[in-house]
Image (spheres, rainbow, N blue to C red):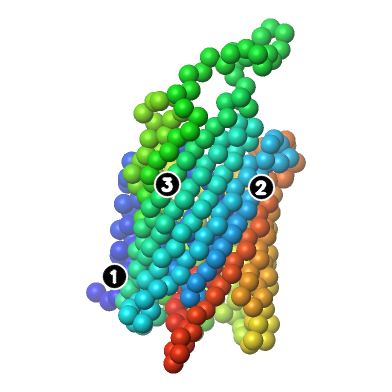
Amino acid sequence: MTCRRAIYSISLCFFLVLLTTNHLSAQDIHFSQFYASPLTLNPALTGYSESTYRATGIYRNQWSSVTTPYITYAASFDMAVLRDKTGADVFGVGGMVANDQSGNGSLNHLRVMGSSSYHKQVGDGHYLGAGVQLGYVQKSIQPNNLTFPNQYTGSGFDSDQANQENFESTTVNYFDMQVGIQWNGTISDRLGLFNGASLFHLTQPKESFLGEDVRLSPRYVVNGGARIKTSDKIYLTPNYIYMFQNQAQEINVGTAVEYHFQDRKINPVVSVGGWYRPGDAVIASASVEYKQVKVGASYDVNVSGLSKVSNNRGGFEISVTYIGKIIKPDTGPVMVPCPRL
């Protein structure tokens, strides 16, 4: 069996395992610019890029036209290490902090994670890697910001009425774990492909404010795409993500067009694209890359059944990525085929 066939077989087997594994309940946060937040997408992407190190930040504001907005943000730093010892292989380490605040109830979800990955060169221009992510999660809630049926009387809502809910605690803490695999391959000088799969909440931690045995469902993610050079200045970057957790699933698919200006020193790049999340939103996206900084913005146009209330206004995101390269004496930067994140 060739290296390429082996890679495809491993990826297929992993995907089938994800599809056939039992799952339970609850849903996670998500970003429309999923490609701009690699450590929340797949642990196997840790340290794997065209750079020596990478810092990212992303902010999302959703449903401000309907209610108190849902606010989500994440920041990460990752880098490739031991390059002088691993040769063509890539060993990556990094860390990530993410926080999500949901609506009037002030349900807050904080995640602090450390990641590592190893990518083995398995053929000319082909890499197969695996990653793991471990860390701490805290969820908290402010019950006083919520309303309950027992507080509605015949004359209206009475905030002085007891909610009669037995909150054992307003804070839940637990350990969490994610794993993932990723394949990247240079097919030709004009085509690069990448595909990955990951499993979140491997430990299925217990999370309940009422003291019940409620477990966080595993979340299964498959992602991939391509980088297509159509001319010296223009690239197409189609990609997708598919996630499912308990009875919820999400598909996001689209593409962007990159225009590269011919300036070798600063290499400015402008990108415009669109994505579609079936049954939920149409996403417009744009980014500008200058020297070592890339800034992206996107907007979700809501097309779900909520659009009559939201007036088609969904969520706004902005992302920032800083890419750095460390060049040691007598060596150059190690370049690997990878998704452009």
Q: Is residue 326 left or right of residue 315?
A: left
Q: Residue furthest left?
A: 1
Viewer-side residue, 123 vs 67: 67
Residue occupying image coordinates x 62% and y 12%: 161
Residue occupying image coordinates x 36% and y 55%: 179
Residue occupying image coordinates x 64% and y 86%: 265
Q: Is residue 287 left or right of residue 4?
A: right
Q: Identify the residue under disc 1.
A: 6
Viewer-side residue, 118 vs 298: 118
> First in sequence: mark 3 or mark 2?
2
| Mark 3 vs mark 1, CA separation in Å | 35 Å
Query: Is disc 2 in contact with disc 1, using a CB cutoff of under 8 Å?
Result: no
* Quarter assignment of residue 159: top right
Image quadrant for the C terminus?
A: bottom right
Q: Identify the residue under disc 3.
A: 136
Q: Amino acid at mark 3?
A: Tyr
> Residue 3: where, in percent of width, then height?
29, 75
Local crowd size for mark 2, using a 10 Å CA cut-off: few (<14), some (14–19), many (≥20): some
Image quadrant for the N terminus?
A: bottom left
Q: Is residue 304 left or right of residue 336?
A: right
- Element assignment for label 1: helix
- Element assignment for label 3: strand
> Residue 220: where, in percent of width, then height?
41, 49
- Position of residue 74 relative to residue 302, above or below, is below
Residue 166 tag number: none
